[in-house]
Image (cartoon, rainbow, N blue to C red):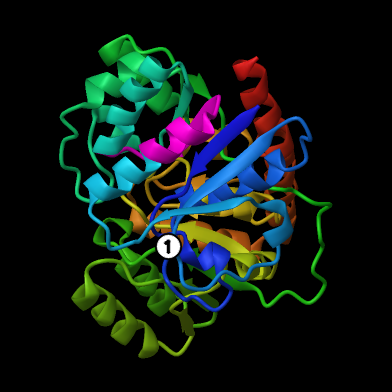
Amino acid sequence: MKIFIIFPKDSEALFDKNSNRTFGGASVQMYNIAKELYKYKDIETFSIIPDYTNIEFDDYDKFNLVKLYNEKDNAIVKFFNFIKYTLITKPEVIIQHGLMTESCILAFICWILKIKFIFMFAHDVEVKGLRQADQSRVLLFFLLRKFAYIIITQNKYQHDTLIHEYGCENIIIYNGFEIKKRNIVKNKKNYILWVARCDSWKQPEVFLQLAKNNPDLKFCMICPQSQDESFFNNIRKQALMIKNVTFINFVPCNEIDKFFEHALIFVNTSLYEGFPQTFIQATMNGVPIVTLHVNPENFLDTFQCGYCCNGDVELLNNKIKELTGDRKKYKILSDNAYKYAIENHNIDLNVKKIIGLLQ
């Protein structure tokens, strides 16, 4: 079986160790899936990427990279080159992650060509037919809902919205990672960790205020620049003025796990999300999560691996103090977090589900 995996345009840092360009969760998921599919000898996986200048990464021998277009090519040229290569190579399956107009057109073309098109939603706003970047409407959204062979959602909200508003069948498969035996770090740096692109709706300023309110605690902020350069510069300037904050602009994909290993607590201040990859990275390292708003399917409460503060910044501050002061409570949440990750976000099990659906 031949499978095409289409990587988002912002995937360069996954394939070039020396790149410091921002990458998103969709890129990481496509990477994890492609790497896992390599284990299946009866599956030939093609990873479709832009023609990046430099390719150098640890898993090179596990990927069949296909460079079909330049990053600066317009959407029509990119799409034409992809369809041309598809007609020549004749894959049985195409997997794509994240809503855009091309997703909808591709679903229709795959239906005509009898190719199984798997679409994976990345963000909650996408199930309303909106783009994640600017929440503009994707007018051809109906084509995706009608012609995609399998639609995969990240959480129950996405699943139920598609069912109730559009009658669109879909299946929930949580984002997955390669989860290894838990590494108990003896000499933790014990910082409060925040990791996200510098978007206004992720509210990095709330995290900085937490640091100001807790000068006795260490805070680490990994905050790659997004499209709004002035907002990023303002946040960076504020962060560098706070003594107990370590501000990091960029961390390579293969090094980010080290920061989670040494974190005491992971904090999310976003107004909304899908199922953040950072939540999985936190739980697979036994790091309790404290969020301001985001709590997909109330999993923090159900599995007792963290707290959601329902928009209450003061409560967010208090929960951080509670966890840093109560080691017994902390250990319970930490153990629960790791157990949750093993049972729900193992990439091995997730890929088996996808293959099962195809068969």
The front one of 13 and 256 is: 13
Q: Residue at x 71, y 52 (%)?
A: 62
Residue 173 position in % (x across, y down): 56, 28
Q: What count of labels does the image hold? A: 1
> Can residue 217 be spotted in the picture?
yes
CA neighbours of label 1 inside 10 A, class few (<14), some (14 to 19), many (20+): many
The span picked out in magenta is 83-100
In the image: residue 267, left or right of residue 140: right
Task: Classify mark 1: helix, strand or loop.
Answer: loop
- Image quadrant holding the N terminus, namely top right
The percent position of residue 153, horizontal first and vertical second, equals 46, 28
The residue depicted at 27 percent of the width and 58 percent of the height is 73
Q: Is there any visible trace of residue 122 in the rendered image?
A: no
State the residue at coordinates (61%, 59%). 323
Asked if residue 63 is positioned above or below residue 82 in the image, the reply reads below
Quarter where residue 281 is shown: bottom right
**Looking at the picture, how far across and down is residue 27, in whole percent?**
49, 52
Q: Residue 15 magenta-drawn?
A: no
Residue placed most toward the observer, 345 or 85 = 85
| Relative depth, front residue between 58 and 236 | 58
Residue drawn at x 42%, y 21% is 159
Taking the image as shown, residue 32 lies to the left or right of residue 123, namely right
Point out the image quarter for the C terminus.
top right
Relative image position of residue 240 (x, y in whole percent): 38, 88
Residue of label 1: 196
Q: Nearer the viewer, residue 95 or 123?
A: 95
Q: Work out whether 247 lies above or below 202.
A: below
| The stretch drawn in magenta includes residue 89 | yes
Kind of residue at disc 1: Ala
Q: Quadrant of residue 211?
A: bottom left
